[in-house]
Image (cartoon, rainbow, N blue to C red):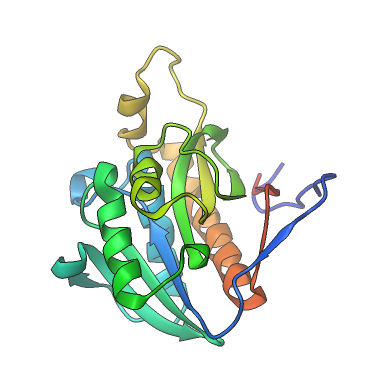
Amino acid sequence: MSWLSQRPQSSDPVNYYSVGNNQNILIVGLGNPGEDYSLTRHNVGFLCLDEFINKNSEMQSWISKKDLKCQLSIGQMGANRIIAIKPLTFMNLSGEAVQAVANFYKVNIEQIVVVHDELDVNFGSIRVRQGGSSAGHNGIKSISQVMGDNYARIRVGIGPKTPEQIKSEDFVLQNFSKDQQEHLPALKKEVNAMLNEYIYSGELPHETRKYII
């Protein structure tokens, strides 16, 4: 099946969470700063946020904000002010940057969406979730510890882990394979479309799975 082909529809009922209008929306991409990590699986959140900034002219270029522990971009999209960040704290302390930015811009937890890698989801698939546990993801764990867990997540699949015996922490810090790197543009395009839908519709489908293969 080709990439970005027709997606199957979920048979489960779809519940919607409104992000409303005329609000600050905080979009967080998770990853580790530095060139050594730029193409690792753990940095797919950074890669997707870079795509979002590049493809939406309403968003400013990234600027470093040491006081807020992140790279930051702000723009007006529709009725909402969008604040996009890439934490510079390294993955395990991502919550420090999210808390600092949310407090400074007075963003409620219900208006936060985090884009991150998900080892339990196969590469080429994306799942959307509102709230819930960290599922062992240290960046999500850090955010939930300081903010609570009722924020939206766009979970970008990087699995399955191969070879099976490799430690998860080693696998996520490996670069995407050459074949996967060829498909990253389509993956990033899909996440950008989902973020735009989230911003302009004011609704997030809960536990609806989207396929890009």
Q: Position of residue 69 (x, y in %)?
A: 20, 62
Quarter holding residue 106: bottom left
Res 58 seen here: no
**Which of these two is toward me, 11 or 143?**
143
Q: For this view, does 174 lie left or right of residue 14?
A: left
Q: How many marks?
A: 0
Q: Residue at x 59, y 71 (%)?
A: 19
Q: Position of residue 82 (x, y in %)?
A: 44, 77
Q: Position of residue 118 (x, y in %)?
A: 48, 38
Q: Residue at x 60, y 68 (%)?
A: 198
Quarter of the image with the C terminus is top right
Q: Residue at x 31, y 61 (%)?
A: 99
Quarter of the image with the N terminus is top right
**Which of these two is toward me, 28 or 164?**
28
Quarter holding residue 17: bottom right
Q: For this view, does 76 lie left or right of residue 92?
A: right
**Which of these two is toward me, 43 or 95?**
95
Q: For this view, does 44 lie left or right of residue 110?
A: left
Q: Residue furthest top?
A: 165
Asked if 144 appears above or below 55 in the picture, the reply is: above
Q: Residue furthest right?
A: 11
Q: For this view, does 63 lie left or right of residue 31?
A: left
Q: Residue at x 67, y 75 (%)?
A: 201
Asked if 174 appears above or below 5 in the picture, the reply is: above
**Which of these two is toward me, 87 or 180?**
87
Res 77 seen here: yes
Q: Position of residue 77 (x, y in %)?
A: 51, 83
Q: Residue furthest left?
A: 66
